[in-house]
Image (cartoon, rainbow, N blue to C red):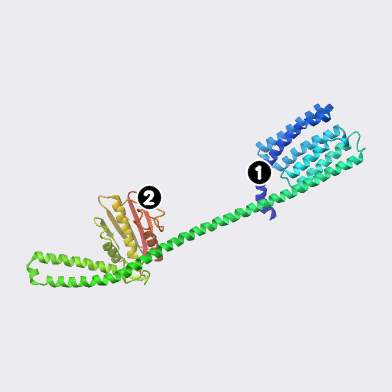
Amino acid sequence: MQSARLSPYHSEMSEFRLGYSKAGSIVSMVLVMFGAGLDYSIYPAHFAAFGAARIATSALTLLVFWVLHSSAAGPKYVRPLTLLWLALPQIMISWMIWETDGVESIYFVGLHLALYATGIILPIGFLEGLGFGLFTYLLYFLACYWHPQGLENINRFVGVSLFILFSAAVSAFCTYFNERGRLNVFRLQRQVGEKNAELEQANIVLAQANTALAEVKGQLIQREKMAALGTLSAGLLHEVNNPVNYSLMAINMALMDPAAAQSAELKESLSDAREGMQRVQNIVSDLKTFAYQKPGDDSQRLFLLEKAIQSALRLTSFELKGVSVELALPQDTHVLGDEPALIGVLINLLSNAAQALLGAGREQPRISLRGEHRSGRLWLAVRDNGTGIAPENIGRVLEPFFTTRDVGAGLGLGLSMSYGIIQRHGGLLSVTSEFGAWTEFSLDLATPQP
């Protein structure tokens, strides 16, 4: 379980170790070659041999660098390859100690420098650092032991040995704490990443909540508008309906007068006046649906969808002037639902269709309303041959506050409200369109079951 948790850490550290190993190998080659000056000043008699050894060591280190940099095995075997190029200068220095003064040689300092540099800079593990330190001391011991003078100066040998072992211990502990530090940094980075992911998810949830609140706000605005309209209409309709009834009564009495029967022009004028007043009476009757019944009340009332469509057509007759409206409905259009709310949906769909037809400028503007029974529900489609909907907008037309109209021409709430109303009735309001040709909105409503 622990190794599984650290697997991402080791994967990330692989690239980190690779970069440091390549950089360290280049520094090692440079320092190894610069050491030729020390050879010339201290052991000029060995300058040629030591120079050849330095060139060979640098060449082997360069080969390791090439494997790290260009070979597929580099990232996979970065740890052993790092220990390999680290070991090359130690082997060279130990050989120089054996070749020169053994225990008395000053080159043991180079072993110390490599140990400290390894522990402080290179990203190797504790066990690797400890092993490298013991390996370095073993090389020093063998170089001194096999030297012709051997371990004659035992005190100096013990002193240098203690220094090398001390350096090896410090190097190992440095690698241990460096590794712990890198692991803690990785854990902190991972925790920050997880917190950022949680924060991003919270932002997504918040954005969704804001969208939902905007939709609710839009619905509340629309309901307040409808409630205000209903309150206003309730008073106006009562005042309008009474004079309309009086006028119809007077016209009917006038039509029964013998003078009207004797004058064709008078009778025709009175008949036109009666027809006009009857249209006003029908409009008043349709508006009563909104004025005297609040949306949502008795939402499963049985009514004729055809009657609701006719009401919607009458209320949008001014907008549909000059538009051919085709009705293709089944014989039985009884549905269950909130009649005023559904009339509002139909008015919205017809108004949008009228706007699309106005923008398209068709020679033969046409709206068709087709209905049929499907799986116990009544399906209705409203299609116009207007401008259609652009592909980039087809998925957004039902969103609240989305509109392609000019500023001030609408809030973009109508279709989203209509979608919510149909959804409340257990149905689905959907839209299909061919840009530049036609648009069709379809909905389905529950029908009374036998």
Which quadrant is home to the N terminus? bottom right
Which quadrant is home to the C terminus? bottom left
Residue 38: tell me if it is visible. yes
Residue at which label 1 appears: 15
Question: In the rendered view, does 213 fall on the left or right side of 79?
Answer: left
Q: How many neighbours does mark 1 have within 10 angstroms: few (below 14), some (14-19), or many (20 or more)? A: some
Instruction: Kindly identify the amino acid type of the residue bearing the numbered disc 2.
Output: Ala
Q: What distance separates the C-alpha of mark 1 from that of mark 2?
A: 49 Å
Name the one closer to the observer, 76 or 224.
224
Q: At which x and y percent is residue 164? A: 83, 42
Residue at the spot 42% in from the left edge and 63% down from the top edge: 217
Q: At which x and y percent is residue 362? A: 27, 50
Q: At which x and y percent is residue 109? A: 82, 38
Residue 53: tell me if it is visible. no
Name the one closer to the observer, 408 or 274.
408
Residue at which label 2 appears: 390
